[in-house]
Amino acid sequence: MKLLQENRYSTAITCPYISSEKKFIQEYFFATNVTKSEYQSLLEASWRRFGIFYFRYACKNCNKCMPIRINLKNFNLTKSQKKVVKKNKNTKVIIRTLQPSMEIYKVYENHSLNKFNKKTNIQEFLETYYYKNDFALQSEYYIDDKLVAIGFLDKVNNALSSIYFAYNTDYSNYSLGTFSVIYESQYALSLNLDFYYLGYYIKENKSMKYKNNFKENQILDKKLNKWIKNNE
């Protein structure tokens, strides 16, 4: 690993996920030439990344943001998740190394604008998702030969990690976010990997509720510094 900047802490801001009374702080650093083994250790210690920016939450007096992952050896679909799979029986998926295109950017642009009312630009998009390394992949989802969703993934020695997923909101009825977790988890299992990382989970945040629907999942207990079964 080549550190471009040592660990730092962000300025405290109003928490964007839960109570406005809470303050949000990140610990972060910038690095290149990170190996799979190094990044696996970072994932296990709750670190995430966008491009060369590595971060984890470091809010004082708050442990609401819990790193969450699926234990693939015990992963079983619920009745509703099986319905999502059936709904997407004709959805074609390709997983490969990073290959940017305007078609992919348009899907991301649509998702950002319609889901979050956020404008994007190509340079920022490429810097965030297309910094090439030994573990970065992309998943492409097609319906009737049209690209409708794109996922960004990291594959380390024992796990697959979801970095970000974006979809064309005209296809919201396909539940593509849920389908992507199912498909990518099964893909990881086919590679004999142990875990699928879903980022962070906050019980009080409705938009993150879906993450706890995937059983069996584990959370990182910060006090014990150990991954444990999530019994919520």
Image: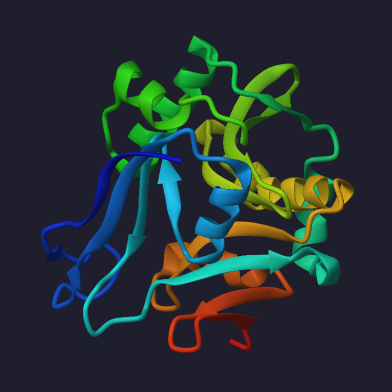
- Residue 96 vertical placement versus 156 (above, below): above
- Residue 11 vertical placement versus 202 (above, below): above
In the picture, measured across the screen, residue 114 lies left or right of residue 76, that is: left
Question: Where's residue 26, x and y in %?
Answer: 26, 60
Question: Where's residue 86, x and y in %?
Answer: 84, 48
Question: Where's residue 108, x and y in %?
Answer: 45, 28
Question: Where's residue 77, x and y in %?
Answer: 81, 65
Tell me how the rendering is colored. Answer: rainbow
Which residue is pictured at 79% across the width and 54% down the height?
193
Which residue is pictured at 29% across the width and 53% down the height?
28
For this rendering, which residue is in front, 211 or 48?
A: 48
Quadrant that contains the C terminus: bottom right
For this rendering, which residue is in front, 98 or 172?
A: 98
- Residue 71 vertical placement versus 169 (above, below): below
Which residue is pictured at 46% across the width and 19% down the height?
106
- Residue 168 vertical placement versus 75 (above, below): above
Which residue is pictured at 35% across the width and 81% down the height?
63
In the picture, measured across the screen, residue 128 lies left or right of residue 91, that is: left
Outermost front residue = 2
